[in-house]
Image: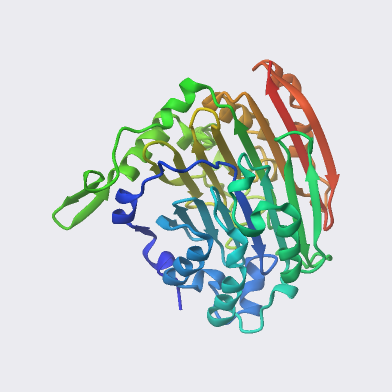
Amino acid sequence: MVAPAYTDDSYVDHELSANLDSTSAFEGPEKLLEVWVWPNEAEVKSHSNCEDGLRSIPLKNWVDILDLVNCKILSMKSSKYMDAYLLSESSLFVFSHKIILKTCGTTTTLFCIEKLFEDIRHYVAKKVNTKEIFKVFYSRRSFMFPERQQSVHKDWKKEVKLLNEYFINGKSYVVGDFASDDHWYLYTGGQKDDECKAPGSIRDQTFEVLMTDLDPGKAEQFVTSRKPGFESFVKNGFEEDDLGHEFGFKTIKSTKLNSIFNDYDQLNKQVGGGSAQHLPSPKEDGGFESAGQFLPFNFVHDAFSFTPCGFSSNSISSNNGSYYYTLHITPESGWSYASFETNFPFSSISNSSINIVDVLIKILKVFRPGRFSVTLINEIDTKGDETELSELFNCDRRLCDLNYKKNERVLYDLESNYKLLYLNFEKF
């Protein structure tokens, strides 16, 4: 049974989107849960009863799962490789072999684990259990208002205890100045030994930029004059629309957040035809061959402007691998916050014209935060390529030109060939 999301390519709940009122929203920093049931797409067919894997879970079941988290689905975009759900509180990405759930506010992210695996067993693979999955990651920045969180989310130790009830080999890290209100938590679990990856598949990495104290002029771009209710609901005959998504698309274009990797797109347009033969080409599993015709990245965007303020967007590669980037902004004065996250492969693609520091600088210029943290969880490949780590590790000179000074730099060796780099900067 294939999920409606994958069949229809897109879905929008215009009524919910029009009526959503975020006046009381306050907590920007997200909880990020990443569950790898299998190591890659190639493993899905041999372990499940359907080739679409986790994407076979119906839309209505994702609604029920997210109800446990206290968030709703506003809209969805699909590609060949993933389904990207834009939520009332951030985002959900569903791949055939893993899910990424990112939620802000007072959501109860970890409360969905039991239901998630019940649905996996029912729709995907009957023998799956939490103790045998490939990997799990859970992370978050320190909350601005921890006392307003619910249940276990008030206390990191309680979150870790709950995670350990489900997953094996759990490890917990607190990164950064614990005495300050700006540090970062990470939990990892799952199998210790790497299973074989599909030949040619791109190594796993997650790059995040977590920003606070946004420049007031930049934050103003994410404030809207629209009101929730019937005024935001647009119906023309059989066609329905809502101003939240309409304003969202205008905002993502006006801020140029729809062109984070535009330089890379331009390179491929300029190269064209046969002259691109030295670049890798996409594979069916989302990896790349070492040679052949290369296709430029085309990102499909889904964006929403909240009322009275706030913004969320998902952008997924429609034609060239299972890559995404997502942004979430709460611009309220006094606790303004913005986040950027991507799994874009950067140096894993030969001759890429854009590097990870270029992307970081683009993001910083949009928001001009007073303070920000950068995290990179990076799987080191068999060749020992650490290009992104090296570039970020030494980025302080370039960021000095933007009037940022480095407060902290922490590098961890994690299990299963992963490394974690944490950086913290503030404006001077």
Query: Which residue shows up at 53% across the image and 72% down it?
Result: 52
Residue 241: image location, x then y, percent: 26, 50
Q: How is the image coloured?
A: rainbow
Q: Nearer the viewer, residue 88 or 319?
A: 88
In this rendering, the answer to whether 352 lies above or below 139 is above
In this rendering, the answer to whether 228 lies above or below 255 is below
Q: Nearer the viewer, residue 41 or 209?
A: 209
Residue 394 shown left or right of residue 123 in the figure? right
Query: Which residue shows up at 74% across the image and 74% down it?
Result: 131
Q: Residue furthest bottom?
A: 126
Counting the numbered discs, the total is 0
Q: Is residue 197 visible?
A: no
The C terminus - image quarter? top right
Residue 218: image location, x then y, percent: 48, 24
Residue 143: image location, x then y, percent: 64, 42
Residue 313: image location, x then y, percent: 46, 44
Query: Which residue shows up at 33% across the image and 57% down it?
Result: 13
In this rendering, the answer to whether 76 lies above or below 58 is above
Q: Is residue 13 visible?
A: yes
Residue 177 shown left or right of residue 375 in the figure? right
Q: Residue furthest left?
A: 237
Q: Nearer the viewer, residue 41 or 415?
A: 415
